[in-house]
Image (tube, rainbow, N blue to C red):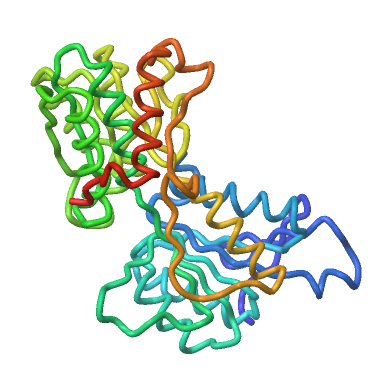
Amino acid sequence: MLGVLVVINGLLLFAGAIWKRGSREGGAASRRVRVGLVFDVGGLGDKSFNDAAYRGLTRAEEELDVQTRTIEPGDGSDRESAIRQLAAQGMDLVIGVGFMFSDDMREAAARFPNVKFACVDMTVIPGQPPLPGNLLALRFREEEGSFLVGAIAGLVTKTKQVGFVGGMEIPLIRKFEAGFAAGVKRACPECQVISAYAGTEPKAFADPATGKELALSQYGRGVDIIFHASGKTGAGVFSAAKALGKMAIGVDSDQYHEAPCCVITSMLKRVDVAVFDAIRAAADGSFKGGVRELGLAEKGVGYTWDDKNQERIGEDRHRFVENLRREVISGRIQVPKQ
């Protein structure tokens, strides 16, 4: 194996990746489950999607005593080679964070049948061959969580103009937009939703400058609340909100601390839970390939409601939104996906 090995503060660094030692030492280390995770565009520190996956990984380190390694790829070829590198090194489970790993994961699962693979937001197209037993697609009903934050926006807006800023314009992100718009209309039938996307390439998830430009345009048209589903691009939305004293809604993780002045809630996508559960299944022998989908009923999506934002939303609005949650879970409300 080529490369340079350096040990710094207990971390074994190799070829730009990080290998973390487990809490136990000695002979038991060789029997520990080994997990490799490859980040999506934006990488660790996006305070959103990737960071949520990392929380699930670090929780597994603490609770399950697994060994982990993470890689932040550059372009598409780096992403594919990172998956192969981890699998070839004998990982028990390799996790790819993001829909762009979908094809690479199918190929890797076929090439390494003795390695387990999990892909967050994996694209599963009707008519495709079923997933092999060593590949798990982790998917979410993002439209359901977006529906609830849309209702909050519809209840809170004063101008009756709300905005949506997406990252890459793809079906996955359109689920966020569709659910959000439906929630806004449920709470405020006369409200208007203005939408915009940062681009059609993966870099649209890591472009704060464009995010700010789109947000400033929407705020300038009378929008007073913007929900973003755009990864690091959302930092630009928060910057615009702070500059103009407007409101924003975060995504994937609780993003209140990105703009305490302005974030009224965040749509939570529990990538951390999905990643942790996949690792636990690999560790206890219950791992099965196929598709696992998480929505409101499975507590895979939701929204923030705590002492930081309760006053901004208010008890009456919260009760209204919780009633909507129950209706979605019961099936009485069908949230659109597009």
Give the residue at the far right of this rendering. Answer: 26
Instruction: Give the image location of residue 120, x and y in percent.
Output: 44, 61
Instruction: Give the image location of residue 139, x and y in percent.
Output: 40, 59
In the rendered image, the vertical position of residue 302 relative to residue 247, given as above or below: below
In the rendered image, the vertical position of residue 74 relative to residue 310, given as above or below: below
Instruction: Give the image location of residue 215, x and y in percent.
Output: 20, 28
Tell me: 52 left or right of 68: left
In the rendered image, the vertical position of residue 9 relative to residue 76, given as above or below: above
Residue at 82%, 55% (x, y): give it: 23
Tell me: 145 left or right of 162: right
* Closer-to-camera residue (263/81): 263
| Residue 206 in sight in this render | no
Within the image, what quadrant is residue 88 found in? bottom right
| Residue 249 in sight in this render | yes
Q: Please state the total of marks drawn on the protein image.
A: 0
Residue at 45%, 76% (x, y): give it: 81
Tell me: 54 left or right of 78: right
Q: Quarter of the image for the N terminus: give it.
A: bottom right
Within the image, what quadrant is residue 239 found in? top left
Residue at 53%, 55% (x, y): give it: 274
* Closer-to-camera residue (140/185): 185
